[in-house]
């Protein structure tokens, strides 16, 4: 039986989960692979977390250097999250000839060149399946199963917290704030949920998918991003009336004007595969010239799903170590987007829109809105005004035909400045 030694840095929810999987499922892994995985060292700044590892044969330390410099360790697993000190730990591990497994999407999406240059120079592997989609094998699928495809579109529901909130609002008719509170009570949302509800978490993950699917080196900051906090339960009901659902969608799309990279609330046809993704589940929809349409679905977060992906990455590298010594002599050819291809500007986006206006119910208001939209080359497809309360605020909902984002922004700014508009207009893009 061949043995491969692991150094685990970070004993939070996922790190402890990885340790438990290796301890509890080690025999199953060895039966399937002929390889014995052995955790030789663990590292965490939390003394209590270290004390909870009940194994006297394991090195327990608060210093990452103790693991990085340990000659007995083959693979280092970084699970502390964030940019620093994770960046320094990963780079030092690679320069020391250690293979690395990480689930750190924020680190990867902003430091691709540095990390993979160090990996190539030292002929070691970096695996990162758990950085996007938890137990969904989207990284391996894009890198291997779809390697011959020209990818045209990637749609992702990449954040379980926001999907749970939108599902709760849809099924119970509650407000955003009420749904968020439920998510926090269930442990699905953090006490500070901003990274999730702002769309930033999804943007980091989309940057990784854009690199693998389209060969473009971008960070989460390069992705146009909007969150879900302005979505009301009435918007979800209105969307359903017209045959749509609302999702926080991460979109990478190869179009004539460049590569679209955006994360924002989106109306999708209720018949679309992604519309059926409920609760805290994640899914990634990929369209390519050979595969057609494909959907990968599963648990996008949590100790067990994410730990499963991390251990899968460990086993893949362990196989290489056992079979050929683990030397990675091949370059990481991720950045291959053709010269001249650019990231398209959000203002150039052509797409239909859902608009919800809060207006004072009086003659001429709708005509005024329609006139401003027309002046900006925005054509109306449908109008709905369910309530009539003369002199009071009522909602007016408009669906448009395809319009240019830049024109829409100009129109909405002008409309919002009218005395008859009592609240900021809700604007949601529609993917057809």
Image (tube, rainbow, N blue to C red):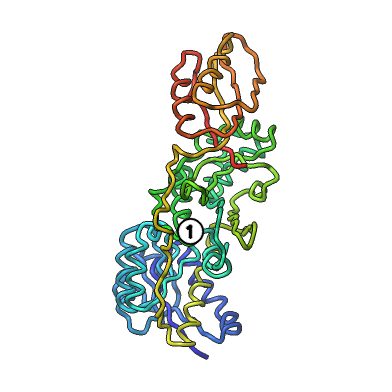
The residue that appears at 64% across and 34% down in the rendered structure is 239
Report the front residue among 11 and 89. Answer: 89
Q: Is 325 drawn above or below residue 240 in the view shown?
A: below
Q: Residue at x 48, y 40 (%)?
A: 227
In the rendering, at what x and y percent does residue 282 appear? 58, 54
Residue at left offset 50%, top offset 14%: 420
Identify the image quadrant of residue 432: top right
4 relative to 101, above or below: below
Q: Position of residue 78 (x, y in %)?
A: 40, 67
Q: Residue at x 59, y 42 (%)?
A: 431
Q: Where is 217 relative to 191, above or below? A: below
Q: Nearer the viewer, residue 396 or 337?
A: 337
Could you tell me if residue 187 is visible in this image?
A: no
- Residue 120 located left or right of residue 3: left
- Looking at the picture, tell me which residue is in the foreground, 342 or 418: 342
The answer to which of 365 and 93 lies nearer the viewer is 365
Identity of the residue furthest to the bottom in this view: 1
Q: Which residue is mark 1?
A: 214
Can residue 41 be seen here? The reply is yes
Q: Quadrant of residue 135?
A: bottom right
Q: Position of residue 308 (x, y in %)?
A: 55, 68
Dot 1 surroundings within 10 Å: few (below 14), some, or many (20 or more)? Answer: many
- Residue 429 image position (x, y, % from top left): 55, 37
**Quarter of the image where one finds residue 402:** top right
Could you tell whether 370 is left or right of 93 in the image?
Answer: right
- Tell me: residue 375, above or below residue 327: above
Q: Secondary structure at mark 1?
A: helix
């Amino acid at each position: 039986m061949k043995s491969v030694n692991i150094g685990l840095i970070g004993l939070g929810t996922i790190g402890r989960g990885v340790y438990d999987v290796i301890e509890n499922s080690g025999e199953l892994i060895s039966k399937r692979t002929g390889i014995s995985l052995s955790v030789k060292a663990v590292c965490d700044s939390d003394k209590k977390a270290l004390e909870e590892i009940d194994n006297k044969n394991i090195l327990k330390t608060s210093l990452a250097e103790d693991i990085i410099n340990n000659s007995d360790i083959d693979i280092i697993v970084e699970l502390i999250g964030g940019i620093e000190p994770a960046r320094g730990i990963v780079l030092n591990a690679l320069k020391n000839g250690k293979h690395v497994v990480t689930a750190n999407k924020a680190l990867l999406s902003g430091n691709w060149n540095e990390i993979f240059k160090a990996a190539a120079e030292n002929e070691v592997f970096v695996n990162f399946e758990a950085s996007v989609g938890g137990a969904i094998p989207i990284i391996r699928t894009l890198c291997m199963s779809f390697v011959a495809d020209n990818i045209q579109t990637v749609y992702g529901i990449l954040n379980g917290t926001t999907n749970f909130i939108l599902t709760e609002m849809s099924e119970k008719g509650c407000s955003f704030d009420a749904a968020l509170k439920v998510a926090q009570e269930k442990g699905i949302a953090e006490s500070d949920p901003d990274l999730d509800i702002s769309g930033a978490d999804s943007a980091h993950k989309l940057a990784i998918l854009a690199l693998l699917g389209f060969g473009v080196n971008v960070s989460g900051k390069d992705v146009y991003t909007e969150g879900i906090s302005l979505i009301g339960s009435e918007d979800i009901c209105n969307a359903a009336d017209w045959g749509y659902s609302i999702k926080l969608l991460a979109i990478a799309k190869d179009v004539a004007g460049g590569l679209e990279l955006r994360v924002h609330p989106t109306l999708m046809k209720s018949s679309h595969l992604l519309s059926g993704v409920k609760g805290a589940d994640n899914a990634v929809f990929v369209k390519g010239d050979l595969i057609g349409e494909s959907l990968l679905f599963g648990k996008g977060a949590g100790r067990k799903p994410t730990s499963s992906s991390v251990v899968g990455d460990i086993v893949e590298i362990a196989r290489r170590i056992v079979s050929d010594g683990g030397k990675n002599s091949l370059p990481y050819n991720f950045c291959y987007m053709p010269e001249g291809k650019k990231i398209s500007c959000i203002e150039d986006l052509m797409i239909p829109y859902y608009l919800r206006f809060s207006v004072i119910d009086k003659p001429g208001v709708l005509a005024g809105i329609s006139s401003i939209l027309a002046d900006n080359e925005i054509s109306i497809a449908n109008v709905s005004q369910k309530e009539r309360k003369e002199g009071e605020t009522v909602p007016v909902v408009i669906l448009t035909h395809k319009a240019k984002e830049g024109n829409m922004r100009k129109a909405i700014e002008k409309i919002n400045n009218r005395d008859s508009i009592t609240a900021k207009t809700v604007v949601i893009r529609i993917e057809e």
